[in-house]
Amino acid sequence: MSEIADKVKASPQYPSDFEEYIDIESGLKRVAGSVKIYIKILNSFLNTEEFDKLTANLAAGDIESAVATAHGIKGMSGNLSLTKLYNETVAFEAKLKQGVYETAEKDGFDATTEKTRAYLKILLDAAV
């Protein structure tokens, strides 16, 4: 197990379901084990405007753009090993492609997004 994963697990804020949301070891493998690069990319992810863009697409009724934005979020979350968000985005994108959009599904997606962001902050705090 990596040093950063050990630090995260030792954090007093470490939630029991953390590993359902973020697979640190897998994420590190994707960046050749570089904690510095992984942390940099995770910070960029936290600051992305794609989630706001998705909300705006849906509010405007622009499902085609929402599908494209969701696809981008899916790629980012998959590459960073944000597993719960990735899986949620896969399902959400599939529904959008079918032309199915329900507020409850977006609410679930938003809840997963917020929890993922909170868990990323725990990871980033431990990395300092």
Image (cartoon, rainbow, N blue to C red):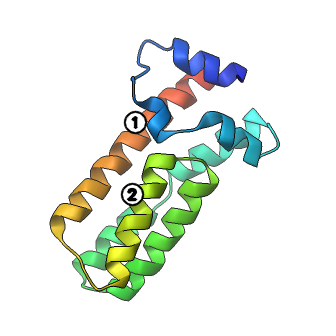
Instruction: Give the SS element for disc 1.
Output: helix
Neighbor class of circle 1 (other Cα within 10 Å; few <14, some 14-19, many 20+) is some
Image height of 56 relative to 29, above or below = below
> Which residue occupies the foreground of this view, 32 or 1?
1
The residue under label 2 is 88
Badge 2 element? helix
Q: Quadrant of residue 57?
A: bottom left
Please tell me which of labels 2 and 1 falls first in the chain: 2
Question: Percent from the top left, x then y, of residue 89?
Answer: 42, 62
Q: Is residue 85 above or below residue 18?
A: below
Residue occupied by mark 1: 118
Instruction: Please identify the residue farthest to the right as the structure is shown.
Output: 32
Dot 2 amino acid type: Glu
Q: Is residue 118 left or right of residue 26?
A: left
- Report the residue at 55% width, 21% height from top: 8
Q: Nearer the viewer, residue 19 or 71?
A: 19
